[in-house]
Amino acid sequence: MNVPPAGFTLLELLVTMIIVAILATLMFVGMQRYRGLASGASCSSNLRQLSAAVNLYVSDNNGMFPAYVSNGANGERTWYFGHESTPAGTSEGNRDLDQSGGPLFPYIQEVGKIEVCQGFNYGNSLWKPKFKGASYGYGYNWILGGRSGGSPMSIAQLKSASKVILFGDCAQINTFQKPATPKKPMLEEFYIINETEKTVHFRHNGRANMLFVDGHVESFSPWPGTEDRRISGEVIGRITKRSSLEYLR
């Protein structure tokens, strides 16, 4: 007489489901880490190309770095990444940006399209654009660029090009401009690395890529106590303590 094979007991079924869940979790974590590493490598490549573009600009402009921003008539502004001719008071996300009007544009065209970072999640429902669409995913050491409307520095003024940041992963948490509110913080591009603000975006597995003037790229963790984690999955902060000028000049 043939005895039919026994099925799974309830305990065996529960153990199997737990094992499958654990394997799925490990696979998901592994994929997330892989994507983070891939976007980090792509970002480092972008930054090195950006270094080449800046070097070309500096060579053609008597050793001077590009201005962070130049203010023109009627509210027009020329940022290092483009020209903004939108009238003053235009709402965030509706501002026009002509990237071809920025001082780095001719040089960026020579070395490749490097305006945005793959690690910046532009598809996030909490992403708040500053211009019409993605514009620039990296922040500039604004001391090199003369801060807001000042005179840019010369490369000859630097003590060590290997110890001064040029560009890096940046963003800002906005709670004060619509559609963001204090109860609905949103993530936006930001274009400054300075000595006071929390603008470094740790978007590559909790780390941020920084490009130095000599062309090398380093990866940083947040400086303890500077992290802003109001948006789930995003970390904004600093790589040095507040008011520190390390890496800036």
Image (tube, rainbow, N blue to C red):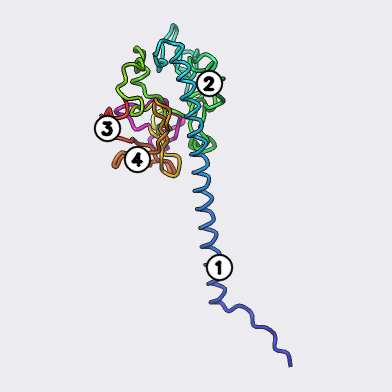
**Residue beneath label 4, please?**
222
Q: Earlier in the sequence, mark 2 or mark 1?
A: 1
| Separation of marks 3 and 4 at Cα, in angstroms | 12 Å
Question: Label 1: which residue?
Answer: 17
Q: CA distance from mark 4 to mark 1?
A: 38 Å
Regarding mark 3 in the picture, which secondary structure is present there? loop
Q: Which mark is residue 108?
A: 2
The residue type indicated by label 4 comes to Pro
Identify the residue position indicated by label 3 in the image.
Answer: 242
Residue contact between numbered discs 1 and 3, judged by CB atoms under 8 Å = no
Q: Residues within 10 Å of mark 1 (few under 14, many from 20)?
A: few
Q: Position of residue 154 (x, y in %)?
A: 35, 15
The amino acid pointed to by label 3 is Arg
Magenta-tinted stretch: 179-199
Q: Which image quadrant is residue 226 in? A: top left
- CB contact under 8 Å: marks 3 and 2: no
Front one among 150 and 236: 150
Q: Nearer the viewer, residue 135 or 152?
A: 152
Q: Quadrant of the N terminus?
A: bottom right
Asked whether the beta carbons under mark 4 and mark 1 sit within 8 Å of each other, the answer is no
> How far across and down, in percent of the image, does residue 33 sit?
49, 48
Mark 4: secondary structure: loop
Magenta segment main secondary structure: loop
Q: Which quarter of the figure has residue 14?
A: bottom right
Say whether disc 3 or disc 4 marks the residue closer to the N-terminus. Answer: 4
Asked whether 30 falls inside the magenta stretch, the response is: no
In the displayed structure, would residue 139 be above or below residue 185? above
Residue drawn where x is 46% and y is 15% of the image: 57
Give the label, 4 or 1, closer to the camera: 4
- Side of 136 where 238 appears, left or right: left
Residue drawn 52% across the image and 22% down it:
94
